Each structure stands twice: as structure tokens, then as C-alpha cells.
Amino acid sequence: MPGRNQEKGTRVKPGANQLVKVHSMAALLDGGDFVGNFQVSDHYYPFTYSPIKAEIAGNRLVLLGKMTLVGTFRHLHSQPGVRAVLASTQGGLGAPPAVYSRLAPAASIAASGNPGDTRPAPSSSADQPPPPATDNTGTSAFCGVMYFHLEGLPMMMGVPADLSHTQLNVRLFPTDDLGRKFHSVYSRLVAALFERNWKEAADLVEDLNQLIKEGAQASVSTPTDWPLMEMGPPDAAPGR
């Protein structure tokens, strides 16, 4: 069974001459970074994608960052200038993240019980029954997985496989305070882009860039000693 943050890859067939293609990589949000690994021919290759800037281009969220990867023989490889273009998302289940905003007072409590959430609670009537308790809809909806198309990765990056045109599947299940802030901003930004609320989206990109700076200052992780954590690829991930 693949470990957490592991993407099950294609095994190399004996005698095969073609380079194995890595179609997707699975990662978890760790602070502000996307940390995971993928498998090629019985070997796991840990990686970290570290965003350094966020922007909206073509009505999509685009991240610019650095990919760091532990390749064959544990050699460290780094590729700056890698773009991650948000292609699609998947909703999350459970309690939504507490709303984080540089402009929202930390002590404000909304009807949903989330700090900083000032949106009104959803109303219901006989003509419009409330959504099922098992679904996160309306103000309780949030982003659980983000699917990015990576641009700027070389074909080979210390790995015996083709990494070009790879999809990055990021599951948002943070366990640290900084990661929870990122989760909140990413979820609201995805909603704003979906609703074509460009003013709110621009404000949230500013929040996101501020968090990226905060994460860069607080980062103390090293890519050479990552544990293999238990996570398989998200279900129903869209293909390229």
C-alpha cells in the first residue's frame, strides 16, 4: 500500500527502451509548501514545491515557485521558475477551516463558529430545503484538493522518468497553524474565482502572497530527510 504523500507510478517493464512518464504527483500542504513523493520502478522520490509568488492569469490561480527533488543516489535537484496553474479543485468534507484574513478582526465569530467569518448563516425555507448534513455547501463549503498543471519542469530531474507536463495533486489537510491559514485563503480564493468576484480574488491573492512571505521566513524543513507518510492519490483526479 502506498504511503502517505505517495503517488503510485508506472513500473518499468524489463527491456523497455522508452522513458517512463510520470503523469501526476500527490502532495500534502505543509505550512506553505506542497510536500510529497512519487514512485518510479520501485523507488520513491521525495519532492517539495515551494511557491514564492501567486497571481491571477487568465482568470486562474497561478503559482510561481521552486521544485526541489531528491533524485537517484539521494542527490538533491532544484528547479526554480516552475509555474503551477490551477486546473480544477475538489470539495472537502468535515469542518471548514477557520477564516483567515489580514483585514478581518481575529475575535469576530460568525454563525458558523469560525473565527473571522462574518458571512451570514444560510437560510432555509419550505421551497428551498437545507442541504444534506453530509455535504459542505454554501458558506460551509471549502476546498479539499487542488489540481495543478506544472510548467517549467525539465524532462529528467535526477529521475529516470519524464517529468514534463506533470499534474500536481495537492490535498489540503494541514496540521499546523500556518497551513490552516493557507487552507483558508486557498478555499476562499477558489470560491471567488468561481464566482468571478475579481475584487475579492485580488485581495485574497494579496493575502496569499503575504502568507508566502511569512512561510518563507518560518520554514526550517529540509528536503533530504522526509518521512514516507501514508497517503494515496486523491480519488477522481482529472487526467491531462
Image (spheres, grey):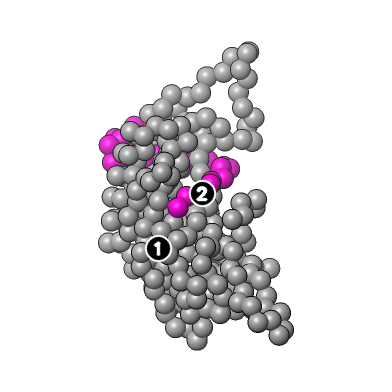
From the top left corner, tell me how far across and down residue 209 is, in percent.
Answer: 30, 50
Name the side, left or right, on which 20 lies relative to 213: right
Closest to the observer: 214 or 77? 77
Q: Circles 1 and 2: CB distance less than 8 Å?
A: no
Label 2 neighbourhood size at 10 Å, few (<14), some (14-19), many (20+)? some
Kindly indicate the quadrant of the structure image that contains residue 60. Answer: top left
Query: Residue 195, can we see it?
Result: yes
Closest to the observer: 94 or 89? 89
User: Where is mark 2, residue-wise?
Assistant: 87
Sequence order check: which comes first, mark 1 or mark 2? Answer: 1
Q: Which of the image's four quarters has the N terminus?
A: bottom right
From the top left corner, tell me how far across and down residue 55 is, in percent.
Answer: 34, 48
In the picture as drawn, the residue positioned furthest to the right comes out as 14
Q: Amino acid at mark 1?
A: Val
Q: Amino acid at mark 2?
A: Ala
Range of the magenta residues?
85-109
Name the side, left or right, on which 19 lies relative to 190: right
Q: Secondary structure at mark 2?
A: strand
Numbered mark located on residue 82 in the image? 1
Q: Is residue 54 above or below residue 134?
A: below
Numbered mark located on residue 120 in the image? none
Report the residue at 65% width, 50% height from top: 236
Report the residue at 53% width, 63% height from top: 166
Kindly indicate the quadrant of the structure image that contains residue 21. Answer: bottom right
Label 1 neighbourhood size at 10 Å, few (<14), some (14-19), many (20+)? some
Q: Label 1 to label 2, Cα distance in Å?
A: 15 Å
Dominant secondary structure, magenta: loop
In the picture as drawn, the residue positioned furthest to the top comes out as 126
Closest to the observer: 213 or 85? 85
